[in-house]
Image (cartoon, grey):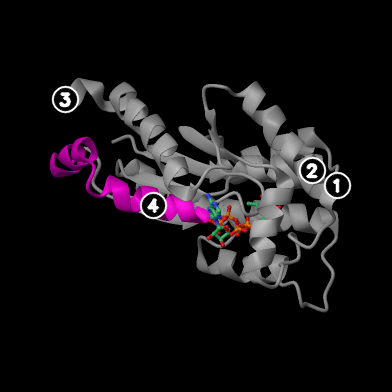
Amino acid sequence: MDGKLIVFEGVEGAGKSTQLAQIHTWLSTEPQFQTLQQRGIIPDMIVTREPGGTALGATLRSLLLDGTATHTVNERAELLMYAADRAQHVDEVIRPALAKGCWVLCDRFVDSTVAYQGHGRGLDLALINCLNDIATGGLTSDLTLWLSLAVTTGLARSQRRGILDRMEAADLSFHQRVQRGFEALASRHPQRIVAVAADQDAEQVTQQIQAIIKERLGTWYGHHF
Ligand code: Z5A
């Protein structure tokens, strides 16, 4: 059994959660995916996220993101908390699902740490790669959909939604460094990370992602059809 880890990445307000939900719904009726499910090749599909994909992660998430908290979180503590969330998530949720052949649709993964704590906060990238390796045990995504969108557009979308969390409230230059981090990652890993133009309306973004996933279904499972 060999499941697939499909990650949605991008700056705030890029539309990850919206698209993840759309793709989850679409896959449950997509004919090729259905065939693979009926034959037991893909027994199931799960939706999860970082931070917060486990009970421990949910606690870490509220400590990390609470915009009204009185505690401060220093940059190294923040990095280690994201790593702790990931270590628990990989062992408790992601690896067991992949071992059964399931698809795991995950909102954010290791590239967020490189982009936010590395490029955004300026922490050492070699250290971050090392921590990511410890947390994942070397697991990488099979496909990362990078929803590419101007930072100002994404932040405006988040602002329209209401109160900003602790990370969203960081200054614009921080979010611009994060964006450059995602750009650098996408050019370094062109096979794993596929850019999606996220500045279009949600339906058009979904169509782009559907085309990418259909192409991967052929590559990964073509011999079954
Ligand atoms: N973080 C980190 O620093 N290091 C790490 O290792 C990890 C995470 C894993 C939590 O992530 C925070 O943790 C995040 C990075 C940091 N920092 N922040 N802030 P999160 O994923 O929970 O938080 P988020 O990125 O802020 O989520 P978000 O704002 O919800 O963004 P989104 O999921 O990409 O967008 P959305 O919820 O789908 O859409 C946002 C709004 O835009 C919403 O009102 C939609 O209706 C609207 N929307 C969506 N698509 C469109 C289109 N196409 N057009 C117009 N409007 C749209």
Distance CA(mark 4)–CA(mark 2): 27 Å
The quarter of the rendering in which ligand 1 is drawn is: bottom right
Residue 27 part of the magenta-drawn span: yes
Q: Nearer the viewer, mark 4 or mark 3?
A: 4
Q: Which mark is residue 22?
A: 4
Distance CA(mark 4)–CA(mark 3): 25 Å
Distance CA(mark 1)–CA(mark 3): 48 Å
Q: Earlier in the sequence, mark 4 or mark 2?
A: 4
* Residue at x 71%, y 72% (from the top left corner): 66
Determine the secondary structure under disc 2. Answer: helix
Q: Earlier in the sequence, mark 3 or mark 2?
A: 2
Q: Position of residue 26 (x, y in %)?
A: 30, 48
Mark 2 CB in 8 Å range of ligand 1?
no
- Name the residue that disc number 2 marks: 176
Q: Nearer the viewer, residue 79 or 158?
A: 158
Q: Earlier in the sequence, mark 4 or mark 3?
A: 4
* Residue at x 32%, y 26% (from the top left corner): 220
Q: Nearer the viewer, residue 85 or 66?
A: 66
* Residue at x 23%, y 42% (from the top left corner): 30
Q: Nearer the viewer, mark 1 or mark 3?
A: 1
Determine the secondary structure under disc 1. Answer: helix
Q: Which mark is residue 225?
A: 3
Q: Which mark is residue 23?
A: none
Distance CA(mark 4)–CA(mark 1): 31 Å
Asked whether the beta carbons under mark 3 and mark 2 sit within 8 Å of each other, the answer is no
Can residue 92 be seen by looking at this rendering?
Answer: no
Can residue 189 be seen by looking at this rendering?
Answer: yes
Q: Residues within 10 Å of mark 2 (few under 14, many from 20)?
A: some
